[in-house]
Image (cartoon, helix red, strand yellow):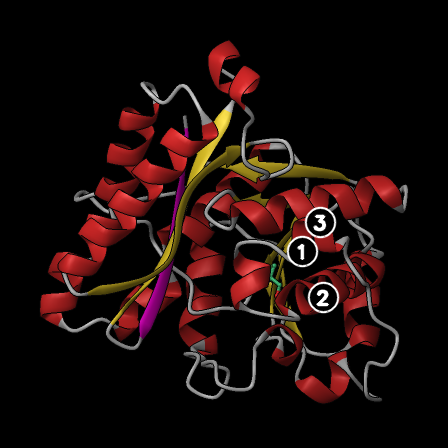
Amino acid sequence: MHTVHTLAELRAELRRRSDWALVPTMGNLHAGHLALVARARELKAPVVASIFVNRLQFGPNEDFDRYPRTLPRDAQLLQEAGCDLLFAPDEAEMYPQPQVFRIQPDPALAGILEGAVRPGHFEGVATVVMKLFQMVQPRWAVFGKKDYQQLLLIRRMVAQFALPLDIVGLDTVRDADGLALSSRNGYLSAAQRAEAPALQRALLGLANDARHAATPAQLLALETRAARDLAARGWAPDYLTLRRRGDLLPPGEQELRQGVDLVALGAARLGPTRLIDNLEC
Ligand code: PAF
């Protein structure tokens, strides 16, 4: 595997082969990221991974500065996973001038759930992902479903700008106790790590109970109870909710009756660490 840090080097390496599959990451890789690389390899494409901790998608009081940067270990893991090329630009390479041209995603999607709690987050995500797509010009890009809203937003961006690539979504990889793998799990103390799977259990419970919800009001009552139960365990929930998979809006009464495809989404703080998860149901 080659590692490159500049756009010029990246372009030179990309020219050697065609139809690349891109796995965009912020590094501090875990088995979830390596599953994305494995999925990219199934496409029989040469695989390029990117590692860039994107300041634009972090709010002023978020963990940009302490986000773990573990490039040598990440490069080793990618090499072992069969990745062909690693693009690891620094900030000056990615944003040589202040990035004043930005992607403004539809607030109907980017302003709810994660976007409501983290204003500007999806503008930062969409901008860096669009920039990576321009830099790499991949034939495919592979993203995890753990960031469900991000994946939906990127799919829409690709469709609306008629970008010539396919987006591949991959199921969330979990530890044996159900905790979704995340770089932020590394912030958890031993006691918090033991508690952390409660978020997935809360989503499972909500998805299960929601089978009996006939109206949006009943659904809201279940969501409120799920958040209250999690709070009673010491969490600070931002949201626990069941939404339509296609646009992440709440289902109406008729849709509940017809059994529309839903996804349970949750975000909550455990101590200083904010975890997110979701389950299609
Ligand atoms: O999902 C992530 O790791 C990031 O949001 C991404 C897509 C690499 C953009 O910085």
Q: Is the CB of mark 3 within 8 Å of ligand 1? A: no
Amino acid of disc 3: Ala
Q: Which residue is mark 2?
A: 123
Q: Quadrant of residue 202?
A: top left
Q: Is residue 260 above or below residue 188?
A: above
Q: Is residue 254 above or below residue 26?
A: above
Query: Which residue range is magenta in the image?
Result: 273-280
Nearer-N-terminus badge (2/1): 1
Main SS, magenta region, reads strand
Query: Gap between marks 3 and 1, in whole Å?
Result: 6 Å
Q: Quadrant of residue 127?
A: bottom right
Q: Give the percent coordinates (x, y) of residue 135.
A: 82, 64
Asked if the residue at tag 1 contacts the one at tag 3, i.e. Cβ–Cβ closer than 8 Å, the answer is yes
Q: Which residue is mark 1?
A: 110
Callout 1: SS: helix
Asked if the residue at tag 1 contacts the one at tag 2, i.e. Cβ–Cβ closer than 8 Å, the answer is yes
Amino acid of disc 2: Glu
Q: Nearer the viewer, residue 80 or 276?
A: 276
Q: Quadrant of the C terminus?
A: top left
Q: Is residue 276 magenta?
A: yes
Query: Gap between marks 2 and 1, in whole Å?
Result: 8 Å
Does any portion of residue 45 appear in the rendered image?
yes
Q: Residue at x 42, y 69 (%)?
A: 28
Does any portion of residue 18 appear in the rendered image?
no
Q: Is residue 111 above or below residue 12?
A: above
Q: Which residue is mark 3?
A: 108
Q: Quadrant of the N terminus?
A: bottom right
